Image: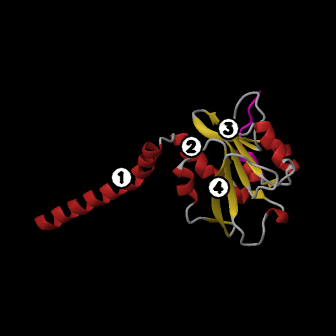
Amino acid sequence: MVATRSARTMLIGAAMAILMLSVARPGWAMLRERRTPDYVIKANYLYKFVPFVEWPPRAFAGTHAPLVICIVGDDPFGVALDDAVRHRLVNGRPIVVRRMSMITHGTPCHILFVGHSDDQAADDIWRAIAGEPILTVTDYAPGVAGGIIQFVLYDGRVRFMIDAPKAQASGLLISSKLLDLAVRMQP
């Protein structure tokens, strides 16, 4: 009976160690890449928006063409975004992440995160993708033209605002479920 109790204690200890390591992994990745927890959350949001957005058929080369997430300018996500989308399919499509310093008209992106950039001004980016079916995502900055979706900190949590008219102008249809989750902030 003593051997059974010690074996049970060892098994419980091993299970706790495995659980702690699996929970701690994102923390280690953040330390290694010096990413904030907010950007790990935002990286996960990027691909989780996809099922709630409808792109026009012309946005994809075919029925199984990948969904492309582009990062232009500074990349605040590092490996967090790659880890979040690895081996994931959304609506039957694999997800590809591309990082670039500039964006031009016709760049194949479905989601575009616009980070801070010394290479290309935000106004140039908005002109280059005007009318394209691209879900643009930015961090909120007062007085700055933002994306269709803008990340905000609200009550200490990462949330988002949605500019529905801007989405419609880009040919995107955003589900009412996602619109209901968005926060509304007063200027």
Residue 1 visible, this angle: no
* Sequence-earlier tag: 1 or 2: 1
Per the model, the C-alpha gap separating discs 4 and 3 is 16 Å
Tag 4: amino acid: Arg
Which residue lies at the image location 19% right of the left edge and 65% below the top edge? 7
Which residue lies at the image location 68% right of the left edge and 52% below the top edge? 70
Tag 1: amino acid: Met
Whether residue 185 is in magenta: the answer is: yes
> Dividing the image into 4 quarters, which one contains the C terminus?
top right
The residue pinned by badge 4 equals 98
The residue pinned by badge 2 equals 39
Query: Residue 1: percent from the left, percent from the top?
Result: 12, 67
The residue pinned by badge 1 equals 20
Residues drawn in magenta: 179-187
* Sequence-earlier tag: 4 or 2: 2
The residue pinned by badge 3 equals 117
